Structures are given as C-alpha cells and as structure tokens.
Image: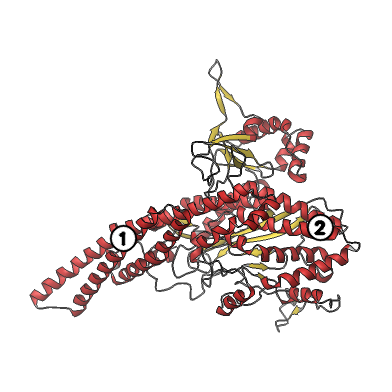
Amino acid sequence: MFKFEESYGSKVFNDCVMKERLSKNTYEAVRKIKEEGIGWNSDVADEVADAMKNWAMEQGATHYVHWFSPLTGTNSGRHDSFLDGNDENGKPIIKFSGKLLAKGESDASSFPSGGLRSTFEARGYTVWDVTSPCFIIDTTLYIPTAFCAFTGEALDQKTPLIRSSQSVGKQTLKVLHLLGYNDVKSVKPTVGAEQEYFLIDKKFYSNRLDVKITGRTIFGAKPPKGQEMGTHYYGSTKERVRDYMREVDKKLWQLGVPAKTEHNEVAPGQFEIACVYSDANIACDHNQIVMDVLRKMSVKHDLACLLAEKPFNGINGSGKHNNYSLATDTGENLLNPGSNPESNIKFLLTLSAFIRGVDEHADLLRLSAAVSGNDYRLGAHEAPPAIISIYLGEYIQDILEKISNGEITSTEIEHHKKMNLGAEVLPMFDLDENDRNRTSPFAFTGSKFEFRMVGSSQPIGFVNTVINSMIAVTMEDFANQLSGADDKIKKAYEIVADTYKNHKRIIFNGNGYSEEWVKEAEKRGLPNIKSTIDAIPVITKPENIEFFEKSKTYSKSECIARYEILYENYIKTVNVELNTALEMVNRLYIPAGIKYLGKLAKYNHFGIKSGITSQTSISRQKEISTLVDEISELTHKLEKSHNTANSIEKIEEKAKAMYNALHTDLYNLRNKVDILEGKMPKEDWPTPDYTDLLFYL
C-alpha cells in the first residue's frame, strides 16, 4: 500500500533531509541562498556534497549526473560514478566533493549554440542550481544544473528563467514597498503545468515508422469514429490506462512532483495530468520529469506515450496549459482578486502589468509557443488561435472600465451571485465571477493567468521567461511612476486607468475561433503570426532585444543565438519528417499498392478467361492503379522540393522552403496515400491504421 507520509519526496534531497543531515550553519546558508536569493557561498559545498552522497548511496545510488536542458528541448547529462579509484589494498575510494557538486564540465560541441562559439571550442559548464532539489531515479542522483558556454552565455532554458524570476521578484517587490506593504520580503512566480498526451499500444507503435521517428502519424486515413460523440472526455478510464496512471503518480510523488489531476481528454486515446503549483523554476524541472516519467512508464505497461502536438490528423492535438501567478513570502497570491477586487490595489496593479505586458510583447509570447508541431494545432478549433489576446471576463473588465472612467465605488459591483438549480436537495453555491473561454490564448481564470498556446512537447522554461520578463519590465515602470507621487494609492489607480485605456485592445472575451475576430484583431493592430517560421524572427527585432536586456534575461548575443537555434531546430525537425515520409511511401505504401494491384490483375485475368467477370473488381484495379501513379508522381515532387530546400544556404529561406515542402507537397501526398489506404484491404496495408492506434486500449 502506498503511504503518502512515507513515500512522498522519499527520492528527493529536500529541505527536511538537509535539515537532518547538515550542520545548523550550513543548512542556514543553503536556506538563505534558496529563499532569500543570497549569493552562493562555496564554503558550504563540501559538507552539502558529502551529505548528499551519503544519502544517495543509502538509497542505492551509484552514480550522479549534472542534469540540464540544452536548447534541443530535451534533458541531458553525463553519468559519473561515486567511485574514485581504489587504494593500495584494492578497496574502492568513494568521493564526491563540493567542487564536483557545484560545477561540471561538458563537451558542449554537439549542443546548439547559435554561433556563440565555434564547433571546435567545445568547453561548456554545468552549474548546480541550489534552488531546485536533487533527486534519485533508479541508481542515479540527478543534480539540476544550469548550462553555459565557456564564454558565459546561457545555452539552456534554466539560466534565463532564473534571471527573469529574479527580475520580476525584484521589481514587483519594489512596487509593493512603494505602496506600503513592507511586510513582504520576496515575490516569486509560481507555475502549474497541465500536460496532455496520447497512449497507444506498443505493438502498433513498433510497426509505425513515422510514430517511432517523429512522434506523430505522417500518414493515416480517418477512422469511422473520431471524437464527435464526446464520450471520451472525462469518461471512464480503461483499467489498463488507470493502472499506468497510478504508477506514474507514485513515481512522481516519490520524486516530489505534486501530480494532482488526471483524466481522459477530448480525443480517443488522449489524457491529461496536472500538477499543483510550484516556484516557476522548480515547476519547469517538474514538467521535464513528468514528460520523462510518462514516456518511461508507458514502456513497462506495453504502451507508448506520444507527446507530439498533433499525433493524429482529424482529432484534437495536445497542448500544455501554463498556469501562472505571483506569490509573496507572506502567502498572498497577487492575482487573487479577493472579495472586493475594485479596492484591491495590489491585484489591480498586477493585473494591469499583465494587460500591458501581453499587449506590448504578444509577438514574443507567440514565439514562446512556436514549434513545428504547433503549426498543425493552433487555431484548429481545439486550441487557441495564433492571435494573442487576453480574456478577463465581463466582471473584471467592468471594474477596469469603471476605474478608467472614474466611476467606480465599492457599492456598484455585485459580488458572489448564488446559483440555484431549482432542486431543493441540491445546495446553492457561489457563482464564479468569470466564465471560462477555451478559445482564449491568455485567459484570467480567477486567480491566475492560463497561457494555453504551449505545445505538449515543449519545455516551459522559455514560456515563463517571457512572462517573467514582460511583468518585470512593466513593474519597473510602474515603480518609477509611483516613486514620484505624494499620494501613491491615488497614483496607482491612475496607472490602472491609463494602462486599461492604452492597452484594452488586447482584451477579448468573445469567440477566438470566429472569422469576425480575425478581422477585428487586424483592425486593432494585433499581430497574427500563423507559423513557427514567421514567429522566429521576432526575437531579433531591436525593440525585443532591448526589452530582454532591460529585464536582464538575455544579452543581445543570446537573442541572436536563439534565432539561429530555433531555425536550425525547425529545419532539422522537418527534414526528419520529410525523410520519414519518403521512406514510408517508397518502401511501404507504393509497394503495397503494387502488390494489391497484382492480386486484382490476377483475379481479373482468370475471371475474364473463365467468363466470370466483376466490373467492381475491374473498376477497383483501375482506381488503385491511378492512385499508385498519382502517389508516385507526388512523391517525386516532394523529393524534388525537399532536395531543393536542403540545397539552400540562407537559414531563413531554407526554413521557408522546408515549410512549403511540408505543408504543401507532403500535404498533397498524404491526401492520396490516405485515400489509397481507405481503398485497400486491411490485411494488405503495411502499417496499423487509426482504428488500431486510437481504439485498441
């Protein structure tokens, strides 16, 4: 039986373990680094390293790894054992020093750098992130680290995230102190991520080259049933999947990851897991762990976990809702409106910072959700549109409208309406102040903002770095305005009013899927960045480089490097998908069509000779023959466009050519292959179909 008290966090070198195993002075030094942002003290490293090693080895660990997230979007690390040779008697020497804990050296030549250094300049560093607890998986101690080049530039998502968290905390704290809330000593961004994913049976996964290589089906005819009945969403979970979910939960709980909610999602075979809020940096590490555990645990259950944004055509894809708020060390959520939002100036100023930040930096928010897989998903009536807007709901927007017009008093707003369902046995309850708008990319949902554009495969470090940065820069300006005012509360309300007037174009409470909204957004001057290749260039716009430098998040060289890396990642991703598509068509689908033609031809030949002919069979032979020829022609066209794209030197033009090959030539080829699949006997088709993949669980 799983016991929370004994098992939760049992594989984590957390605060309780440190308090028990470290001296009082060392524990206090580490605590101050973590909680108060006091600079690192190398004097404590040896004691921490020794305690960590002893604890880990008692748990059965034999190795340690500096665990980091390079700009490939994956997790990386080199595993080293605690063994440091043997003595003159042949006995093992076990050693793990503070130096080894605090800094590791990695051959960084194969990781993306975006031109920050030459390939032959290979040195990089992994640096222990004290704020994110170490943990054990199997027999390895994982040490969360930042990753940087020899010249000091960040080569990961963690370093800019920590920088931006520091900035938003500092600037928000400054505003609170100017308003007289001096009891607050620190402010931190908190994040809770909802992770969507698909499960398919391992035997079908093993026979789908596209799924194994790219994580999605490049080909696949529509099944007779999709998600139109709506029976899968929140439906009864199959026993096999439930057993998998429970084992995932237990593993995550041991690792201190607060997995809370799980359910069936809209599409068949689709599910979701959500975690309780944590500090942004820890939440990002937790989401990386969640994705890793989902994949690894699926193998144990003869399943395959798909994290791609659009694994299947014609049904919903998978996203990752990023729930964000700001919390004080006094336990207050600054995005909690309270019972009287109109008199809660901390909430109103924080809300205003988001309104202005999102309006001024919508292009960067869109960039943060830009990956190839999301190009299939955004705006497809299953995810938010590519146009960034904020949903506030009529109640909150009405308050801002009245403040901007100087009309509001606390008696004008009706709070906490009661819901009566008309049956006396059912209790009345307080109605939420806001409804939910599933079409909004950036929605206020009561005490947090929910950014819904993020793709399911994406790490959430960059997303939260952008959000942190936009709030930090805005709060800094708010602080400058407040500092010169005699009546700071009055000035704060003026800031709220002015912000709403100047940036209310970003607020939209209606249907984000409608064509009317596309036209309205254009009138408002809101950007509509439809694809990844259109989003990438925004990071090198002069105003965005200046913005990141002001927020102390990225340097100019780091922005330019990410421009290069994002393009490189896109090109490599699409190149693999096109290679996979061509291999499947040339080696599987065209041969299968020809083989089936042979069967039909043989049947028709002998049928005619015997005087027993079938017009259906003859017609089918002609139809299949035509389809195979069309597929062959479209394959040659794709090969040509793919080769042309690969020959282009300039990175932006190459990415556009790859995009066109993917979304035009492969799109056309897929349509014909899918039609062919629908015309052929199941036993003659060389790969599992959508019915196998989606409905076998």
Dot placed on the residue nearer the N-terminal end, 2 or 1: 2
Q: Image height check: is 197 above or below 432? A: above
Q: Kindly identify which residue carries mark 2.
A: 480
Judged from this view, the residue extending furthest toward the right is 486
- Per the image, label 1 sits on a secondary structure element best described as helix
Residue 275, can we see it?
no
Q: Image height check: is 33 above or below 265? A: above
Q: Quadrant of residue 600?
A: bottom left
- Per the image, label 2 sits on a secondary structure element best described as helix
Residue at 64 percent across and 30 percent down: it is 99
Q: Residues within 10 Å of mark 1 (few under 14, many from 20)?
A: some
Residue 58 horizontal/vertical position (percent): 62, 34
User: Tag 2: residue type?
Assistant: Asn
Quadrant (top left/top right/bottom left/bottom right) for the C terminus:
bottom left
Residue 92 horizontal/vertical position (percent): 55, 23
Q: Image height check: is 62 above or below 579? A: above
In front of the other: 502 or 668: 502
Q: Kindly identify which residue carries mark 1.
A: 585
User: Tag 1: residue type?
Assistant: Val
Residue 267 horizontal/vertical position (percent): 50, 68
Q: Residues within 10 Å of mark 2 (few under 14, many from 20)?
A: some
Residue 545, can we see it?
yes
Instruction: Report, in whole angstroms, how far the alpha carbon at label 2 lies from the one at label 1.
Output: 62 Å
Q: Quadrant of residue 537?
A: bottom right
